[in-house]
Every structure is written in structure tokens, then in C-alpha cells.
Amino acid sequence: MRAVKLAFLGSAATVGLSNGVLAQQVDSDATRLERIEVEGETATGPVGGYIAGRTATGAKTDTPLSEIPQSVSVIGREEMDDLGADKADEALRYAAGVFAQPFGYDSDTNWIFIRGFQATQTGVYQDGLPLYSYGFGGFFIDSFTLERIEVLRGASSVLYGGSNPGGLVNYVSKRPTGERRRSAETWINDAGKASLGFDLQDRVSDTLDARLVGLVRGGDGYTDFEEGFRGVVSPSFTWTPDDATSLTVLGNFTYMDEVHGGGGFLPYVGTVVDAPFGRISREANFAEPDIDTYLRRQASLGYEFEHTFDSGWTVRQNARAGYADLHEVAPYPYGYAGFSPTPAGPDNLLERINFEHRTKTTTFLLDNQLEGTVQTGPLQHRLLLGADYKYFRMDQVQASSTATPISATDPIYGTPQPAPVPYIDQEVTQRQVGFYVQDQIRFGGGWITTFNGRYDYVATKSEGTSDFDTSDGAWSGRLGLAYQFANGVTPYASVSTFFNPLLETTATGELFEPEEGYQYEVGLKYEPTWMDGIFTVALFDLTRQNVVTGPFLAETQIGEVNSRGVEFEAKANLTENWRARAAVTLLDVETTSDEDAGLIGKTPTAVPEQQAALALDYTFNEGPLDGFTLGGGVRYVGSSWADDQNTLKVPSSTVFDARIGYERGNFGADLYVTNLFDEVYVASCQEALSCAYGEGRSIKFKLHATW
């Protein structure tokens, strides 16, 4: 939604905007299942059911989850489908430590907080390479093209360079698996949106496998005059001339043409609490249908090359080039008449900003790796040496004007709007080179020590509205220790540091210093040998320094925010019929340094400090209901604050989801209901003038087939 983007992506208007279970007793005598594993499972391949055994996100090497000295979650394709997730942020709503969709449903952006910090721009990766974005310069990845979504919680600069301190999300693309398999799906929801997707893969020859994934989607949204179209195609092929060498090429083209939805950038009074006229309708849209525009065209092409020498050492090179062209016109509300947080008089008028931008983004990413094992006495070293490069260039023009007011209770559209006036015309280029080393050491029958070190050099140049040319360097590190018991219990501890280069500038046009910080984490991972499941618990203390604070155009960089808490996550096939997912997140997030002493000890806006989720699925495998699955889940999001002073509270919310599925042979059908009881709630507020409704009830019917 436009309001959210303007606050969190650094857009500003000339009027002076601020930056602003379904519980069921399981019979103790029921048959327990042993672990289900995909034969030859790899860190980028399909997940066996809900429970992955391996990941590359937490170590940049194909590593068992239990050996990563940080908390990791993996959501595989089957779990995404069972959740009915059509966007990545929807797939993360049951993950520990993640606050997904903080601003409600947004068709063109996956909004994600991890451990209390916004990760949407600097904490998202695809196939281990960054999907960095700034302003509106970035890429949208459709979840239908993904095999996995993985969450690495905590500071991870030592692996990936500058990144979000709370953690990162890594999208793992669908790629050829070496089998002949075709699938298709179609769905329609109760708003009138429909989708058709296909996934075709085959073995072309003894050395060549190919895959083609695509979809078209379009129709109406759940708010007034919201509509859109999306087309995606992602071809890939893998060439394996011999057992030691492989080359995978991954491509994507995405086209989006939409009219924005409503429900966002609304005042606290009228959404969280009653205005004199009551509450603003959740379905209302205060844009202008005749001029509202969202047009995205993007393409990417990359490859993953790997060769293993006779010595056992492996060399890899991963690369991706991308280009995105985005044009957006988005009139949006911003408070009541006079840009006030409360209505005055009988007219119930909302002020509006007429915002427009044109943004072109070019990226090139490269990661070179050398991996091998070395034995030194009783110590077995698994070494990784690497060098990576990030090129990011953005050409942007942002413009705005004060638009005509509109009634909050009886909106009338069609009034001509003043042309937006440019206030940013800028070309930004950032280059980052990083050198890193990792040593995973095994000894003593079950001990695993992980050492990481990294140095990054970052050069940033801007021409136009802001002119600067500067460079900086930073070290980051991680030290982890774990012990694997034979019964599947692995306790671990780690300490890590991070940095995050900024593109924001001071009032005098100077680039702010990179954010820095550190994290301490202890936890326990349990993979039972007697059932198919994984249980994790983590306690952490994370400090983010050099935080930019203060009012718009007068920011300073003396801020510090501390986030500490505990996370619990469990996934299990309890019996042959029952499957369960659960997550609990308890945070304590507070500002520990700020130019405004009155904010010290306060919690930043939009951050819920308690979350919990629980879901159960039951599949019938005999009798008249053979083939049917009944599923349900409940998601709880605790209260948050709508202002920095912590005087305006956004209440907690509890939302139920449900699913009925049927599968027979190669054919299946699913009925999904999100927000089953149509709970009306505010997901969060960035400030008193910027609140967003959570997603209302949606009903979707899907048919799918494989052959």
C-alpha cells in the first residue's frame, strides 16, 4: 500500500511528511512416524513434507539445519500450498520471529519484520544473492516460482555483507530436479480474482534438464475499484556434463499492471478508535481510479556453476543480473483536514497527497566460493573461502502535490488533481565487495565450532538532488558452538556482529554512517529419532547502533535500539494423519539511545512484542472421507504502538484460518478461508496518521493436477 511505502521507503511529500488451534488431544498410543526424507535432499531442492533437513542459507554451504549456530526456519513448497499462500509474506505468517504483512495485504510488496526490525529492503535474498532495494528501486518475486522460503534469524552480515540486523529471508527458486513432471493449478477467490499457473519439467537428454514455471493472474481486489494483472515466466535448465560439474541457469520475467487497493495510510482516530462518525470502512479506497497506476516490468538472468576436483575441493560461482522499471501514481490519504490526526467539523474530510515516481533499477551480483575439508589431528575442518560483489544502480524521480480532500464516509472521485512536483531527481550507485572465510570444525564425537570472518568495502555515489561520493569498510564476524547428542538434541550458542550501509543523508546532504551492532544467541534444536519433527527454541539479545532518528529533514544518527527475546517453533507429523505447526515469539524491543531523551525506554512503532500461531491438519486415509484433509490455524499478534511516545496503542488481534482439501491420484481441490470470522483489526500503525487494516476474510477455491 502506498502509504506504508512512503513512510518506510524514504518517500516524502512537499507538505512535510514524517518518516516516520484448533486443539486436539493426540492418542498417546497412535502410530508415530519416522522422519520423512526426500531421497538425496539438497539445500535447494524439494522439502519432504513440512520438515527440511538441510539448508544453505545459514552457512552458504549445504548443511544440516541442526549444525547452524542460529535459528533457521524452512517453508517448503508443500507447506506454502497447504497454507494457500500466494505471496511470500503470507507463507511466513506462521513462522517464529517474523511479523509478516504488518500493513495488511499489499499485492506488490512482501512486507516483513524479523526480531522487531523491518527486513523488506535490506533483509531479502534470492538463491543466496541479495534482492537489495532502496526507495522504490527493487524487485518483486512471485511465490509460485519458489521451492522454499528460508528465514535466518539474527545478524548475518558475516555471510552476506550489509543486511538487516534482525535476520534475512532467502527465496530459493524452483529449478530442474531431473525428473519428468508436469503440474498445473487454477484458483478463483470471492473478490473475483483468478489465477492459472503451470510448472513443467523434463529431462531433455542425459546431461540436460529443463523447467518452465509461469502464471497469469488478474481480477478485482477486496477494496473499492482495486484490480490488477500479473504475468510471470521463469525458465531454467541444468547442464551436468559429468558427475563433478553442473551449471544451472535461472531466468525470470515479471509484468504487473495494477490499480492500488485501499485500507492503508489511515488515521488512528477512525480505525483503531472511533471518530465522531464511527470507523472508516475497511473496503474504502481513497485514491483516484482514473489516475492510479502501478506498472512494473522486470527481468533477471543468472547462473549457478559448480565443479568438484579430484582432491574433493569444490569451486562455485553464482551470478545474477537484473533490471526493473516501475512507474507508480498513487494518491493517498494523510490525516484529516489540515493534516490533523483527528477530524474537525462535520465534513469528515481526509487530506490527500498526489504522489508519483518513476524508478529504474539495475543490479549485478556475483559470489565466488571455494569449499573443501582439511584434517588437522583430531579436528576436521570444513572450509569455505569466498568473495562476492554487489552492484546496485537506481535512477529515480519522485514527485508529489497536495491533492484535493475526500470524504472519509462518502468519497466522491473524479476531481482533477494538481500535477505532482518533483522533489527527488537522483541517480544512486552502490558497489560492495566482500571477502569472507568460514571454518566449521568437528571434534570430540559431537562438537561443532563455527568461525566466520568477513571484510566489506562499500562505495556509494549519488548525483542529482543529493550529491555525494563516499566509501567505507567494515569487519563482521560470527563464533558458534554446538554439540550434537545421539538422541537428536543439539544445544548451541553464538555471537555475531553486523553492519548495514545506508543511503539516507543528513540535512546537509552527507551520507550517514553504516548501521552497526551485535547479537548474542543461545538455543536448542531437537530432531527426534522416533518421529518426523523438528523443534527449536532460541534466546537472543540484539543491539542495533547508528540508527537514524529524528523528524524528516532534521534526522540525526545517535539512535540505538535493543531487541531481546525468545522464539519457539515446532513442526511435526504427529501420526500418519495429524500434522502440526506452532510458533511463539516474545520480544522486548526498546530505544536505548536517541536525541530525544523522552524516547529512551520506549518501543518503536509497528512492532508487536508477542506473537503466537498454531495450526493442525488431519488427513483421512480410509472410509468415505478417504482423501480429504481438514485444516485450521490460529494466529495471535500482540499489541503495538502507533506513536514514538507510546501513548497510542494498537490492540492485539486473533485470526483463524481454515482449509478443506481433497486429493485423489493426481488430482486435487482445496478450499481456503483466511480470517475465517472476518475479524476487523488494524495490523499496525507507523504513526497517528498512518494505520493499516489487516486482511479481511478471503475465500479461495483451487484445483490442481500433476501428470
Image (tube, grey):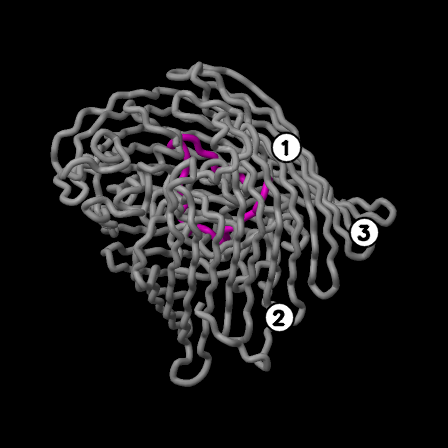
- Quadrant (top left, top right, bottom left, bottom right) of the N terminus: top left
Along the viewing direction, whichever of 559 and 48 lies nearer the viewer? 559
Along the viewing direction, whichever of 678 and 663 lies nearer the viewer? 678
Dot 3, crowdedness within 10 Å: few (<14), some or many (≥20)?
A: some
- The disc label shown at residue 670, or none: none
Tell me whether circle 1 and circle 3 mark residues in contact (CB < 8 Å): no
Instruction: Report x, y in % for residue 295.
Output: 29, 37
**Residue 392 left/right relative to 136:** right
- Identity of the amino acid at label 2? Met
- Ranked by sequence position, the earlier of labels 2 and 3 is 3
Identify residue for label 2: 531
Residue at the outermost right position: 377
Work out whether residue 313 can be spotted: no
Magenta residues, as a range?
A: 129-155
- Ranked by sequence position, the earlier of labels 1 and 3 is 1
User: Please, is residue 479 above or below residue 513 in the view?
Assistant: below
- Residue drawn at point x = 53 percent, y = 17 percent: 470
- Residue drawn at point x = 64 percent, y = 45 percent: 59
- The disc label shown at residue 387, or none: 1
Task: Tell whether position 302 is magenta.
Answer: no
- Ranked by sequence position, the earlier of labels 1 and 2 is 1
Along the viewing direction, whichever of 577 and 333 lies nearer the viewer? 333
Badge count: 3
- Identity of the amino acid at label 1? Ala
- The disc label shown at residue 443, or none: 3
Instruction: Report x, y in % for residue 490.
Output: 70, 57
Q: Secondary structure at mark 1?
A: strand
| Image quadrant in which you'd find residue 317 | top right
Q: Secondary structure at mark 3?
A: strand
- Identity of the amino acid at label 3? Phe
Could you tell me how far apart the alpha carbons at marks 1 and 3 are, in whole angstroms? 28 Å
